[in-house]
Image: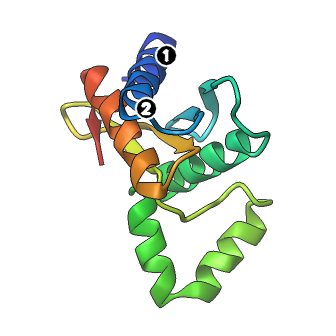
Amino acid sequence: MNLTLDQAQHIITAALAKSREMGYQPMGIAVLDASGNLKAFASEDGASMFRFDIARAKAWGAVGMGVSSRTLGERAKGNPNFFVSLAATSDGKFLPQTGAVVIKNAQGQLLGAVGASGGTGDEDELICMTGVAAAGLVSG
């Protein structure tokens, strides 16, 4: 099974709805497929120009390593040289900062990742998890 465009757009729609409900700052949300390719992106009015690159980099790292960006950030504390090397070798597309989760189907198959940028890492992560659940998928 592959992540569909419809699922990616559903994730974004639900994540943005949650962000507005919570009163967060304007968000950028990137959904990537299992190969790290961009499936869908949205940038709310008023979001800064950095939102896309940050959201995509959080998601790219998550899908590449198969875990949430929160987990990557925790791992980076214990092995900073490795994570700096990952960021350098990926031309800056790897960001181990809280705010992205992997997307899985009910059988646990990795379908992709979603990352957000605009709030705190916890806020970004919350809206990503909300979007994934609304699409009937599992976040991790």
The image's mark for residue 1 is none
Q: Amino acid at mark 1?
A: Gln
Q: Is residue 124 above or below residue 33?
A: below
Percent of width and height locating residue 86:
66, 70
Which residue is at the front of the view, 48 or 86? 48
Q: Residue at x 68, y 42 (%)?
A: 51
Number of residue marks: 2
At horizontal 60% and vertical 33% (from top left) the residue drawn is 26
Counting residues from the start of the chain, the first of labels 1 and 2 encountered is 1
Residue, far front? 23
**Could you say whether the residue bearing mark 1 is in a helix, strand or loop?**
helix
Q: Nearer the viewer, residue 56 or 25?
A: 25
Q: Nearer the viewer, residue 17 or 133?
A: 17
> Closer to the camera: disc 1 or disc 2?
2
Residue type indicated by callout 2: Ser
Return the x and y of residue 124 as percentages of the image width and height: 46, 46
**Residue at the extreme left of the image, as rendered:** 106
Residue 55 placed where, x, y %?
Answer: 61, 44
Q: In this rendering, is residue 97 above or below 44?
A: below
The quadrant the N terminus occupies is top left
Look at 47% across and 52% down and name the residue there: 99
Q: Which mark is residue 9?
A: 1
Q: Quadrant of residue 6?
A: top left
Compared to residue 75, the image places residue 4 above or below, namely: above
Position of residue 93 in the picture relative to residue 36 (left or right): right
Q: Position of residue 139 (x, y in %)?
A: 30, 41
Mark 2 Cα shell of 10 Å, populated few (<14), some (14-19), many (≥20): many
Label 2, secondary structure: give it: helix
Residue 110 visible here: no
Q: Which residue is mark 2?
A: 19
